[in-house]
Image (cartoon, grey):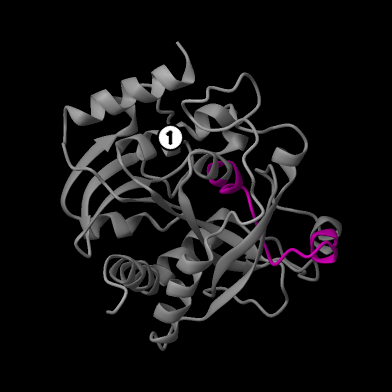
Amino acid sequence: MTLYDQVQEAVAAIRTRTTLQPSVAIILGSGLGDLAAEISNATAIPYAEIPHFLRSTVPGHAGRLLIGHLEEVPVVMMQGRFHFYEGYPLSAITLPVRVMHALGAQTLIVTNAAGGVNAAYGPGDFMLIRDHIGFPTLSGANPLIGPNDDRLGERFPGLANAYDEHLREIARSVAAQQADTTLREGVYVMVGGPQFETRAELLFLRMIGADAVGMSTVPEVIVARQEGMRVLGISLITNKATGEETGEVSHQEVLSVADAARPRFALLVRGILRKIVNPGA
């Protein structure tokens, strides 16, 4: 079965549960899945019930696809994602992006929890992703490796403007109206994980222009852009990662900071959706 056929089979299974056509797809990062509870009239489908969807094995990722309305916008939302370090091929990890596009979504809001490589960033800050560096994807672990199916997109998609400037402007205007939200803007670097980085690695990332580091997002953005979707990326900074810290970071720390940021994160995303559907709001 081709990748295209897998996408169509997944879409057909989802369509037996709902006929709603989403316009915006949202991927929720570690600990940020509670936004899913705010979707109205949601149809929730466990990944295990969708053909060709993988199983999320990481704490903080519930493993459900939800379709409903958020701020009157029809959305499809991944409550939890898949990661390269879980041992899955990137073509399978990114299949949900193709499925969400096939369901009707033309815009992708992708979020993650990330370490703050930029010394000015602190836990609880948000960062708009202006650009990215993908170490796995640069070195050959890429979701587009293999035969290309033109029905899914062109062979050589450009990523020079992967993160939509208009969507970033919307996000900036929304954040400016929220007193408790600090919104940075910078470069996200993807590493393979699952181990957290050494001090030398973090110092290296600072040298090459990284502002935040994480273990996801880049493959999903590559596929979204191949599909022609507009992309907005938001990182929640969960810990300092400058290379000068003396202690060790833990996944529990990441989840704890994400939990504290949930109300502000929900306000930010809901405000962005309002602006997308009603620019004058």
Few, some or many C-alpha atoms within 10 Å of disc 1 (few <14, some 14-19, many ≥20)? many
Please name the residue shown 48% across and 74% down the image: 169
**Coordinates of residue 88 in the picture (x, y in percent):** 56, 28
Quarter of image, res 20? top left
Quarter of image, res 70? bottom left
Please name the residue shown 16% across and 36% down the image: 18
**Coordinates of residue 224 in the picture (x, y in percent):** 50, 43
Q: Secondary structure at mark 1?
A: helix
**Coordinates of residue 239 in the picture (x, y in percent):** 62, 67
Query: Which one is in front, 179 or 72?
Result: 72
Q: Is residue 137 left or right of 21 when viewed as pictured? A: right
Quarter of image, res 130? bottom right
Residue bearing mark 1: 98
Quadrant placement of the N terminus? top left
Q: Amino acid at mark 1?
A: Arg
Q: Is residue 263 left or right of 159 when viewed as pictured? A: left
Quadrant placement of the C terminus? bottom left
Please name the residue shown 71% across and 67% down the image: 117
**Residue 235 in sight here:** no
Residue at the extreme left of the image, as rendered: 41
Please name the residue shown 82% across and 55% down the image: 201
Total marks shown come to: 1
Does the magenta run of residues contain 75?
no
Q: Is residue 53 above or below residue 139?
A: above
Residue at the extreme top of the image, as rendered: 1
Q: Is residue 5 above or below residue 161?
A: above
- The magenta stretch is 204-221
